[in-house]
Image: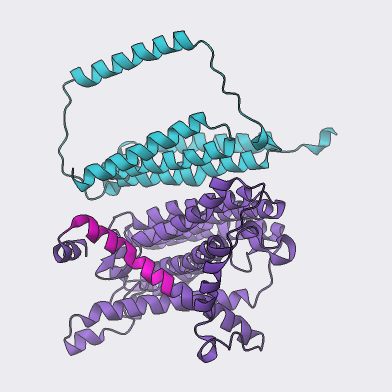
Chain colours: A cyan, B purple
Amino acid sequence: MELYDIIFYLIALTVVVSAAIVVGSKNIVRAAYSLLFTFLGVAGIYILLGADFIGVTQLMVYVGGILILLLFGIMLTNKVYSVDIRRENSYIIPSIVIVGIFAAFLIFVMTETNWVTADPTFPNTTVFELGKTLLVHYSIIFEILAIVLLIALIGAATLARNDNKER
Amino acid sequence: MYDLLTNLLGNQIVAYVIAASLPLIFVLTFVLFAVLAERKVSAHMQDRLGPMRVGWHGIIQTLADMLKLLQKEDIVPEGADRPLFNLAPLLTFLGTYAAFAAIPFAGIYVGSSTAIGIYYITAVSGLVVAGLLLAGWASDNKYSLYGAMRTAAQIVSYEIPTAIAILTMVMVSGTLSLMKISDMQTAHFWNWWILGGPETGIVKFLLIPFMIITFLIYYISSLAEVNRTPFDLPEAESELVSGYHTEYSGMKFAFFFLAEYANMFAVSAIAVTLFLGGFHSPIGYLGHSLGIDWLIPVEQFFWFAFKGTALVFVQMWLRWTLPRVRVDQLMVICWKYLIPYAVVNLIIVGIITLL
């Protein structure tokens, strides 16, 4: 095994184990912190595949943004973290059957498809190409997405505003 | 650097591990002296002497403190969430140390020669917030939780002006790589970005005032990001005991301390790289004029450490000069002053670079 493979398997193990803890943990804060390691691992896999910009954006958006907001929400909500999350199993047999069929289907596709392998040379950086694509070829879509996000922000601020006049 | 070490040691993994731990040696040595320097600076500003007993003028005081911290009992509060409580200091230090991977210390040494260095650094600083929030929550102490909440609110808010100031620099220099940004400012100090960078003619003189504004915005918001006075609300001693690390003792407390001082150097190092010429000498190299090649990296490292430490000294100076701001003032400074100024500054710099 080369260094590359060792690093890949280490990261993959981190992702799988931490994702399992996210699903299985009873404590909501522990689950949230496991999610941190899942995000870190996924970012690691992106970087390992040569997509440096996407990997760091994953860190920026999910760890720096979403996870912190999530934790903030959990910790500011009164006593939410001392409540045990319900983890009951119902409909065990039907779910096993469906998951089994789905897994068999996926394994069939994975083994039978004639995968096209890409050129193994990694680009030195993806920033310039990404920038050109976003701001030259898809500039209108890029701007529209920005406006959609702005509308979402304004909407959230309007909803959260405390209107004292009604009282 | 990696190739050299791989050739020298014959093993890729060992070479990588050694190259990755080089900044750690620097950080540990830096923290050892920075803690002493902080105590001495504060003492002299308050007309005291500071630590004087251990060694000449207390020079090995920090070493003695470290030995004391090593021997201390490791106390975990009864209501604390033990695994998370233990994870928090590690996570905080991880976030801080990860930033050092992309900081160029000298022409021959940068942890990762990635082309998106500065973007990576802004992203990994999010880990520090996660660690501090965790510390506050896992301690099961209301003061810790208040401190952690303040930290998160403060750092998340001040990330915006920091990011806009960095964006301004990325726009004028046209690259995200800290190594390339450093190399643009080579030769003499009038090539530093704070003095208009390697531009020539009228553009350079138009840029200078706006570069100084960018530098000030970056510096002020980076102070808030590392929780230094006047923005040290998260550990305000007079209100919150000591904020998120109230319950920590011994080596775990030492980890928070280490992370805080390493973070101080990290933000100063970014300011140095973006605005003050990085590792390049302001007056030319002795190695060039004497014709000694190996002297140049040593000089570069000296200048980098010197400039970084000088900015850290300014941080200490401000800490013992200014009073702490209130929470509402903290938010007003960020949202009503720093962010609008940073955005207007970004637009003006953009127009100037188009000239």
- Outermost residue on the right side: it is A167
- Residue span colored magenta: B11-29
Which image quadrant: the N terminus of chain B?
bottom left
- Which residue is drawn at the image coordinates 29% and 74% (left, top)? B186
Tell me residue B50's x, y (percent). Answer: 61, 85
Magenta-span inclusion, residue B39? no
Q: Quadrant of residue A9?
A: top left
Q: Is residue B268 visible?
A: yes
| Image position of A75 with respect to B47: above or below | above
Q: Nearer the viewer, residue B244 or A156?
A: B244
Residue closer to the observer: B130 or B117:
B130
Rendered position, B180 above or below A12: below
Q: Residue B44: horizontal and vertical position, in percent?
A: 61, 87
* Percent x, y of residue A31: 53, 36
For the point 37% across and 42% down, the residue is A43
Asked whether the viewer can see residue B350, the reply is no
Inspect the magenta stretch and tell me whether residue B20 lies in it.
yes
Magenta span dominant secondary structure = helix
Which image quarter is the C terminus of chain B in?
bottom left
Q: Image check: A154 left or right of B267?
A: right
Q: How many marks?
A: 0
Quick one: B10 or B274, which is closer to the camera? B10
Q: Residue furthest bottom?
A: B56
Q: Position of residue B68 (x, y in %)?
A: 55, 72
